[in-house]
């Protein structure tokens, strides 16, 4: 299983364990080590005014991610009209906090450190959508949820934030820490049961349609 | 390997893969591709069950999911046993064990069959009329006996070893049913490149084409055309083709539920695969191509084994290579059954036709039959069948020009195919909330205007000819993707269509002595329905419930139109005036496993654990569920009981110091220049002037004036507050506050962020609390003067940046240390180690509850119930009298909130402190009052107080505060006990200890 | 299950939302100025119309915005959604346009 973090500058702030924690037929689940995370609440107008702070772009549209090159993988999720998640490498935490304080200055805003609040998993592989389909109704098709998308939604009975960092089907799921075991348990349970990627039931080895494709007429 | 009724060279079964199965202990053979029904028929077995009520011998009626009779218990081994499977949809696998149901001691010899001879007693409404008195006999006598006698198979008695999973999907077009119509629709829709899901309930797509041996489409045989269509769809990566998948529910906004049977057809499924997958599909457009169901004819003893629907015979013959009989009589009131006769004749079977219609009312089908040399009795009715466990003759009688029925003749046979016309499968359309309209010409209810993004096409829309189905399908598929209609596939060989509706076959026999079945599964006869109408039931909904027609697991797929028509005929009304019953989901039975999916066992709900959970677990804590949280309840040592452990923990906190994990408390960070103004409006207290570094206990009301939540408000900076909520209340409080910020007070500059899980909360409570934590705290002066009760400091604890609050929910000196969750365990362990010399004890939620109750602190949701005002619980002092407004203030002046007689929080002590009251126990003044006894209130909290050495309780009592000292009566398991009303505070009424 | 178009996020499953009852009922500026009857009507009395109603919805598990929706209570069809604070759309007028 490839280390996707290396192919995805968007989340290189997150140290990825060398091997995924769960591997299935076409999908794997990897738990990231924590990173520095803040919730920034700021009025949209003020945000456009600021445009960029501490290496975070605040110009993106709702439910999109922005990553800026050359700033050690700092990434922003805009998950509400006035709500951004700002993520940076843990080692940079103090520097980034300072830069945020300076950059936002006296503008009306709220900056809250939530680095310990949540846990992020990476789900990737060609069947990652089918694994996620076991618990969420959100349409993750390219046409609806292309690379660079993010949103708060639900997986089974847990509220999550899902982001798609890359063109290859790969998703980052962030969840409050006490729900992490629940999600991991569901995925572990589901992974052998998911539909293989890009296959209809005919080709997944369970159907016995072969005989129906004989051209023999019944007479 | 004898399958005497198998025809060589016919059918789509795979004769290269023979397999064995057993039926009622008999070892039989079949081939891959067989259903249980086709396998039984190949072995000459029709009789495979007893009916629900009369225990009459029953055989296989249909070849599809509408089967009412042939319900089998299927055992796939290793605990995989299911009752009530329709033999017509179960695919036989090697080693499968099938058993018939609803008989004792055996299928052949059944004592319950006595019911059949007593049938005059068991007319419609029999139970309602008979088992009326005495009332008590219902639960003890009648119901158990009825339940044992009636009913279908027996429920599995072992846990289901199979696994089930859900799958959510979105598509542009969902096509339900892959007969000719659905395949044409799928091909047309798939060409657009849009996302298409196409499902069919059968093992292979094709529908009626799979048993059509004569039609050609675009120059191909029907089966060749099906193969070509599937190959085309199968290579299109935008198409998901789902065989063995039933669309069983049509919900709002084109949300459709499908049940996909993944492994039931495999003898040895690959491990890990789910047995079934429940699809929840959100479709832009839906094409319903669900086909139609053939109607039985209603005549005396029409339920005998060996009597099938005519098209089912054709299905067994052409698709499965099985001839259900050697000498078949086709009884019909329409054209389509002639094709069965022709196919039987072509297969070399003896066949005759009895047709209700006059020869001149027939079409090309009659000519075709005659050309083939088939004997046809036109203008003949069927007045009965002979043979009990297998039909051996059909009684046909001519209908004279005056309408009277002539002398019957017996047509000797071993199989009958009957056809009373066709009923479109409008179930899904009806579930989509569409209204049905009656079409006189086709004698059918057809889909009216669509109310969702849906089209019905083909036979379910009343189009019965093959070329019409292909045309409608191609049009619907193209329209669903917004394209012009393609040229439809062309069919040759016209389909024989058209029938003469008949409700009950004419007969000169005494109708009161005739057993002509309408609903086979629920054993409802024509006589029952006529009786119901005579007794005054005129609405079909009432007739249905009174006679139970259409209420079985098959939902009357084969019977509804005959029942409706009979009611209309008996009332001499037009059929639409009688109405039609509502079709409800599921279309066919769905397993509980599929509905549950992964939501079982430990995955049923999230199990939320705090950062200290592992420590508590290792320490031997017992846990309790609080919402989804596992909270340490108490920490028994050695062989301590819960009471002993709690008493020890309580005393340790009162006398020395205790350690408690409060991490589950809800936490919200409130930030912005208007944060103080906002909180001042949200809480009852005056918070605006609260200095930085102070905390306050806050009460939050709903706009109705009732207590909604409580917690501590800590001011970290002018524009920054850290507030806590109850464990379960955090999301509700956050949403409540967001609501006011966004919709009522959008002028306020305030932002909210949930921080519940950011912080681990370590409570250190007791007289020595300061001594324990002091060595670890840097950056804060813990002295009473510098950091009094109800204050907050940002400082370092154990070298970790912390929010340290001096507060108490125990009545003792106490601190709550908030540290980032990832550091929670390490800080906890350091404090625990340091606490040992102080005699520190770790305590759980039970001790926390006792301690707070001793001090009279309420728990919102335990001592309040959503109808309690601050004054009711004695917290009027927390309600600011100065503030012009806050949420709920106006309601506190509502007449009912200031009226006398409200329940108020009080303490309770039982006489002689003898017993601990039950929480929830009712409180009354006069236990001997005639029932109903007027209630004063109830006990809300009750514990043994270790510190006091006696039980204490809190409760709510009408006008309780004015009744201090009164004696009331409280219910116990045995009766009543007396208790004295006291003030709801038992320890340190002056509240000095927290300032220690 | 409904499919609800959040004015900010687009169409999402009903699972993500929470309904807050009838819309366009503003909290009085000064509740204490209302007599009991008027306060009771503000608090408890609702139209409960069969047909098109304006409802408050909260995209609780999404962008967390409150917004309003015009929903036909007989058919469950949602005719329009719009941000909180905006006036109720006049469907008849829009139909003419």
Image: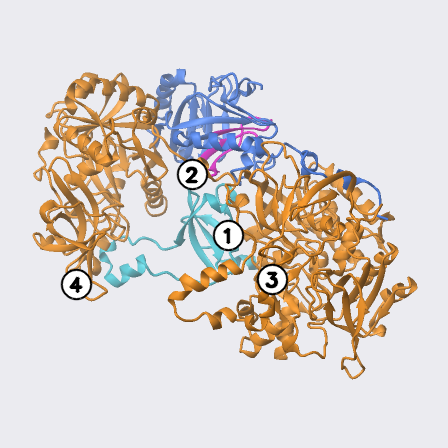
Give the letter of the chain under mark 2.
B
Q: Is disc 2 placed on a helix, strand or loop?
A: loop
Among the chains pictured, the one given cyan colouring is: C
Q: Nearer the viewer, mark 2 or mark 1?
A: 2
Q: Are marks 4 and 1 on the same chain?
A: no
Query: Residue beneath label 3, please?
Result: B55
Which chain has been coloured blue in this picture? A
User: Which contiguous range is marked in magenta?
Assistant: A147-173
Share a chain, discs 2 and 4? yes
Closest to the observer: B377 or B896? Answer: B377
Chain that is orange in the image: B
**Residue B790 higher or lower than B83, as above or below:** above
Answer whether labels 4 and 1 touch (C-beta < 8 Å).
no
* Disc ID at residue C80: 1
Circle nearer the viewer, 4 or 1: 4
Residue at the disc numbered 4: B928
Subunit of label 3: B
């Amino acid at each position: 299983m490839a280390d996707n973090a290396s192919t995805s500058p968007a989340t290189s702030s997150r140290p990825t364990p060398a091997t995924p924690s769960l591997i299935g037929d076409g999908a794997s689940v990897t738990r990231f080590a924590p990173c520095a995370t803040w919730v920034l609440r700021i009025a949209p107008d003020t945000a456009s005014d600021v445009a960029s702070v501490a290496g975070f772009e605040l110009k993106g549209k709702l439910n999109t991610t922005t990553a800026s090159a050359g700033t050690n993988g700092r990434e922003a999720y805009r998950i509400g009209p006035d709500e951004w998640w700002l993520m940076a490498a843990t080692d940079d935490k103090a520097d980034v906090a300072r830069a945020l304080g300076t950059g936002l200055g006296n503008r009306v805003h709220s900056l809250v450190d939530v680095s310990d609040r949540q846990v992020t998993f990476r789900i990737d592989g060609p069947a990652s959508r089918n694994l996620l389909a076991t618990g969420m109704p959100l349409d993750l098709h390219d046409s609806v949820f292309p690379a660079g998308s993010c949103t708060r939604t639900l997986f089974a009975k847990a509220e999550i934030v899902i982001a798609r960092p890359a063109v290859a089907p790969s998703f980052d799921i962030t969840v409050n820490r006490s729900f992490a075991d629940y999600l991991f348990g569901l995925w572990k349970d589901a992974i052998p049961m998911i539909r293989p990627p890009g296959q209809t039931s005919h080709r997944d080895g369970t159907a016995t349609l072969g005989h129906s494709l004989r051209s023999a007429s019944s007479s | 390997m004898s399958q005497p009724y198998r025809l060589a060279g016919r059918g789509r079964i795979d004769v290269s893969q023979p397999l064995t199965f057993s039926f009622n202990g008999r070892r039989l053979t079949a081939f891959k591709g067989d259903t249980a029904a086709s396998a039984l028929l190949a072995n000459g077995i029709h009789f495979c069950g007893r009916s629900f009520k009369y225990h009459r011998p029953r055989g296989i009626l249909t070849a599809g999911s509408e089967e009412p009779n042939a319900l089998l218990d299927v055992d796939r081994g290793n605990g995989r046993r299911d009752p009530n499977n329709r033999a017509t949809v179960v695919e036989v696998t090697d080693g499968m064990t099938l058993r018939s149901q609803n008989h004792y001691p055996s299928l052949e010899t059944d004592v319950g069959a006595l019911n059949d001879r007593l049938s005059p007693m068991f007319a419609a409404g029999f139970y309602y009329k008979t088992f009326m008195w005495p009332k008590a006999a219902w639960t003890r006598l009648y119901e158990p006996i009825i339940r044992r006698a009636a009913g279908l198979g027996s429920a599995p008695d072992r846990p289901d070893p199979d696994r089930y999973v859900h799958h959510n999907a979105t598509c542009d077009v969902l096509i339900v049913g892959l007969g000719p119509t659905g395949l044409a629709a799928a091909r047309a829709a798939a060409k657009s490149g849009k996302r298409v899901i196409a499902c069919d309930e059968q093992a292979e797509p094709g529908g009626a084409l799979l048993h059509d041996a004569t039609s050609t489409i675009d120059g191909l045989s029907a089966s060749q055309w099906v193969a070509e269509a599937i190959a085309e769809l199968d290579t299109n990566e935008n198409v998901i083709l789902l065989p063995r998948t039933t669309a069983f529910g049509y919900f709002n906004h084109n949300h459709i539920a499908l049940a996909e049977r993944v492994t039931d057809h495999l003898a040895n499924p690959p491990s890990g695969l789910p047995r079934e997958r429940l699809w929840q599909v959100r479709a832009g457009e839906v094409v319903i191509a669900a086909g139609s169901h053939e109607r039985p004819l209603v005549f005396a003893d029409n339920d005998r084994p060996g009597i099938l629907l005519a098209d089912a015979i054709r299905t067994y013959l052409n698709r499965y290579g099985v001839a259900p009989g050697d000498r078949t009589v086709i009884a019909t009131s329409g054209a389509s059954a002639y094709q069965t006769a022709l196919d039987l004749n072509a297969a070399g079977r003896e066949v005759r036709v009895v047709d209700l219609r006059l020869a001149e009312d027939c079409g090309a089908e009659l000519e075709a039959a005659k050309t083939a040399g088939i004997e046809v009795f036109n203008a003949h009715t069927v007045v009965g069948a002979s043979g009990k466990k297998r039909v051996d003759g059909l009684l046909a009688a001519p209908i004279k020009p005056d309408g009277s029925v002539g002398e019957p003749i017996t047509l000797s046979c071993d199989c009958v195919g009957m056809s009373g016309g066709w009923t479109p499968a409008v179930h899904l359309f009806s579930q989509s909330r569409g209204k049905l309209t009656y079409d006189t010409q086709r004698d059918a209810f057809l889909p009216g205007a669509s109310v969702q993004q849906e089209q019905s096409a083909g036979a379910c829309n009343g189009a019965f000819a093959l070329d019409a189905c292909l045309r409608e399908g191609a049009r619907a598929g193209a329209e669903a993707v917004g394209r012009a209609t393609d040229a439809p596939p062309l069919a040759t060989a016209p389909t024989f269509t058209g029938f003469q509706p008949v409700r009950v076959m004419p007969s000169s026999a005494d109708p009161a002595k005739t057993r002509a079945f309408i609903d086979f599964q629920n054993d409802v006869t024509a006589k029952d329905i006529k009786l119901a109408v005579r007794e005054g039931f005129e609405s079909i909904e009432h007739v249905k419930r009174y006679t139970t027609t259409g209420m079985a697991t098959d939902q009357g797929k084969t019977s509804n139109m005959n029942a409706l028509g009979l009611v209309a005929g008996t009332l001499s009304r037009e059929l639409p005036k009688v109405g039609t019953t509502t079709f409800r989901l599921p279309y066919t039975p769905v397993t509980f496993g599929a509905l549950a999916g992964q939501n079982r066992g430990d995955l049923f709900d999230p199990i939320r654990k705090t950062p200290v959970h592992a420590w508590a677990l290792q320490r031997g804590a017992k846990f309790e569920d609080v919402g989804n949280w596992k909270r340490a309840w108490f920490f028994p040592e050695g062989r301590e009981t819960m009471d002993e452990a709690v008493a020890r923990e309580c005393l340790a906190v009162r006398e020395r110091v205790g350690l408690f994990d409060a991490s589950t408390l809800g936490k919200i960070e409130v930030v912005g220049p208007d944060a103080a103004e906002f909180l001042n409006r949200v809480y009852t207290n005056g918070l605006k002037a609260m200095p930085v570094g102070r905390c306050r206990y806050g009460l939050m009301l709903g706009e109705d004036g009732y207590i909604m939540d409580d917690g501590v408000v800590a001011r970290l900076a002018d524009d920054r507050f850290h507030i806590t909520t109850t464990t379960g209340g955090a999301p509700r409080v956050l949403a409540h506050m967001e609501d006011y910020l966004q919709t009522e007070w959008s002028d306020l500059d305030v932002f909210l962020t949930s921080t519940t899980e950011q912080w681990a909360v370590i409570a250190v409570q007791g007289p020595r609390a300061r001594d324990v934590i002091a060595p670890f705290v840097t950056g804060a002066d813990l002295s009473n003067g510098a950091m009094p009760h109800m204050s907050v400091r940002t400082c370092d604890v154990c070298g970790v940046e912390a929010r340290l609050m001096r507060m108490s929910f125990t009545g003792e000196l106490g601190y709550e240390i908030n540290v980032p969750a990832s550091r929670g365990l390490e800080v906890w362990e350091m404090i625990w180690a340091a606490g040992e010399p102080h005699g520190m004890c770790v305590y759980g939620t039970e001790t926390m509850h006792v301690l707070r109750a001793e001090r009279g602190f309420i728990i919102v949701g335990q001592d309040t119930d959503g109808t309690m005002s601050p004054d009711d619980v004695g917290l009027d002092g927390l309600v600011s009298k100065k503030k012009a407004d806050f949420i709920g203030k106006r309601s506190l002046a509502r007449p009912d909130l200031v009226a006398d007689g409200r329940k108020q929080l009080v303490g309770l002590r039982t006489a002689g402190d003898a017993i601990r009251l039950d929480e929830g126990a009712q409180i009354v003044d006069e236990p001997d009052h005639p029932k109903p006894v007027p209630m004063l209130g109830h006990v809300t909290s009750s514990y043994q107080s270790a510190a006091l050495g006696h039980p204490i309780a809190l409760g709510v009592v009408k006008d309780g505060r004015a009744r201090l000292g009164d004696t009331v009566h409280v219910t116990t398991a045995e009766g009543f006990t007396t208790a004295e009303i006291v003030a709801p505070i038992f320890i340190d009424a002056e509240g000095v200890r927290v300032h220690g | 299950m409904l499919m609800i178009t959040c004015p900010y996020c687009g169409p999402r499953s009903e699972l993500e939302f929470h309904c807050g009852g009838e819309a366009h009922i503003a909290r009085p500026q000064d509740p204490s100025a209302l007599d009991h009857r008027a306060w009771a009507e503000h608090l408890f009395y609702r139209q409960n119309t069969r047909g098109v109603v304006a409802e408050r919805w909260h995209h609780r598990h999404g962008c967390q915005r409150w917004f309003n929706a015009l929903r036909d209570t007989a058919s469950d069809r949602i005719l329009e959604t719009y941000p909180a604070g905006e006036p109720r759309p006049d469907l008849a007028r829009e139909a003419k346009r």
